[in-house]
Image (cartoon, coloured by chain):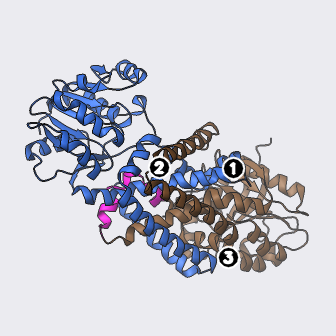
Chain colours: A brown, B blue
Amino acid sequence: MSSGPLFERIALIGIGLVGSSVARRVKRDGLARSVVCCAKSERSRKTALALGIVDGAYARAEACVEGADLVMLCTPLGTYEALAEAIAPHLAKGAILTDVGSVKEQAIAQIAPHVPAGVHFVPGHPVAGTEHSGPESGFAELFDGRWCILTPTEGTDEAATEKLAEFWRRCGMSIERLDPKHHDIVLAITSHLPHLIAYCIVGTATHLEELTNSEVIKFAAGGFRDFTRIAASDPVMWRDVFLNNRDAVLEMLGRFSEDLTALQRMVRYGQGDMLEEWFTRTRAVRRGLIEAKQA
Amino acid sequence: MSSGPLFERIALIGIGLVGSSVARRVKRDGLARSVVCCAKSERSRKTALALGIVDGAYARAEACVEGADLVMLCTPLGTYEALAEAIAPHLAKGAILTDVGSVKEQAIAQIAPHVPAGVHFVPGHPVAGTEHSGPESGFAELFDGRWCILTPTEGTDEAATEKLAEFWRRCGMSIERLDPKHHDIVLAITSHLPHLIAYCIVGTATHLEELTNSEVIKFAAGGFRDFTRIAASDPVMWRDVFLNNRDAVLEMLGRFSEDLTALQRMVRYGQGDMLEEWFTRTRAVRRGLIEAKQA
């Protein structure tokens, strides 16, 4: 495995948590000769430049992608279609275009039709994150030990897919290739539904007239605080996840609600043995995570 | 504030996460002249002695409490009634009897009737924990910066309540006094419901025939892993929490389910503005936690 730069110029469209973590990693490990970013907000552009994590910061994506051999969409899913259309005429021949979106079927549906011949679109999803947003929140180690899912479809260039895989490996990730639809089902249960539920319960807590917010906050150490962390994730990014993975999320939500009704019934009728059996089974999943170093 | 021992002899009934953390704190900071524990399992007794965190380990609670001026029940809620009945004749005159249970109305209902005259029962709940169990899992810092809720009722001795409060303060906690019923409602939303939901979704994930457990585990970094941690909490302790706080848990679960149905509807009909507004509101709760140093 070479340790030299993999790309000449990486263009990051969006410089939030993921984009700025990629920029830091690229700089730290010399993964490209230069890395530039695009951000709508002047504040983000100034911050990225001041942090020294990019060599240039553009207001318009069209200018940002010029001459880049890797273009990565790191903005919320809802921006993909307009961005793809706007940058298409400006993409360099032979460039790899990828994204980091949490939903792959819709990402492909919105980007692929605009990709010009000679540009290699490889949809991707580095499964890593925190609840923080913005260029200040990134860090070079975000991806270490995590999995990056690539979802090439029929016709995706194999050499481009392998080059992108190598890029993410050099960011510290392991690679899995999945069918886009299967990706969306797996992520619906491992990521999207957990977020929806966390957003829900934190909302429920704020509605309660019997207790003050300060009580909820004081006693959050009993379990609630982990939910508040997840429910502090970027509202626009997550809005777009739910709008773009509707069917899989609704399917998983249906199953979750059935299970919750079953648990509710066990509580109501005092079925202690059944509760204990359920809670013992879920404990084993944690052991699996610890063994797989994903805890 | 004196730094000498607060008690002559502390008897911990149960030496799991909380009991063994108390033992370690008592030893570290000299909060009592001696601390002993009781555990049904020989392995737990041997471990506690080998760790040097107790001065004696008993198989029977009756023997453990003899001569103790602080007796603390650190076992699952379902054991309280039988334990209270068994130890009652052996409690020293003037001793403080307390518990650390996560449900207070039922704890009081099960313990109070057995408390002999001259013994001061002060119900308590140190709101702190991890997903780990057993005497090896405790640590002296578990309580630092967290809140301990005391729920004295009419007739609870004020001097005993204040002495117990001082004990928990010396363990690093802040003290709040609440009515037992109100405690159970607050904890239902900040602790019990989060646990039930985490147990639920981890169970749902294991039922899915479309995906393998290894996929769930690999991609857990997307949010699921926090739920697996909570759903790895002690099955018997949590079974007893749900059996003993049924009404408040069912009430909170009803509200949560209503809210979840509302969110489900927003996802189904693509109501992005409403989703974004909800997710923005929950983000503010996290800021509250961070400001209160409970994050």
SS for tag 3? Answer: helix
- Report the amino acid beneath label 1: Trp
Q: Nearer the viewer, residue B248 or A39?
A: B248
Residue A217 belongs to the span the image colors magenta: yes
Q: What residue is at 70 percent from the left and 49 percent from the top?
A: B215
What chain does mark 3 sit on? Answer: A
Which subunit holds the residue at mark 2? A
Residue A92 picture quarter: bottom right
Instruction: Report the magenta stretch's main SS.
Output: helix
* x and y, in percent, of residue A190 in the image: 63, 56
- Local crowd at mark 2 within 10 Å, few (<14), some, or many (≥20)? some
Residue located at (28% from left, 34% from top):
B83
Residue A259 falls in image quadrant: bottom right
Part of the protein shown in magenta: A210-229
Residue at 74% from the left image edge and 78% from the top image edge = A81
Image quarter of the C terminus of chain B: bottom left
Total labels drawn:
3
Q: How far apart are marks 3 and 2 (CA)?
A: 49 Å
Q: Tell me the CA gap for discs 1 and 2.
A: 39 Å
Nearer the observer: mark 3 or 2; the answer is 2
Give the residue at x 53% y 80%.
B274
| Mark before the other along the chain sequence, 1 or 2 | 1
Q: Mark 2 points at which residue?
A: A271
Amino acid at circle 2: Gln
To which residue does mark 1 refer?
A147
Q: Which residue, given by chain and number where applicable, does mark 3 sit on?
A: A79
Q: Where is residue B234 in the image (x, y as percent from the top left)?
A: 45, 41
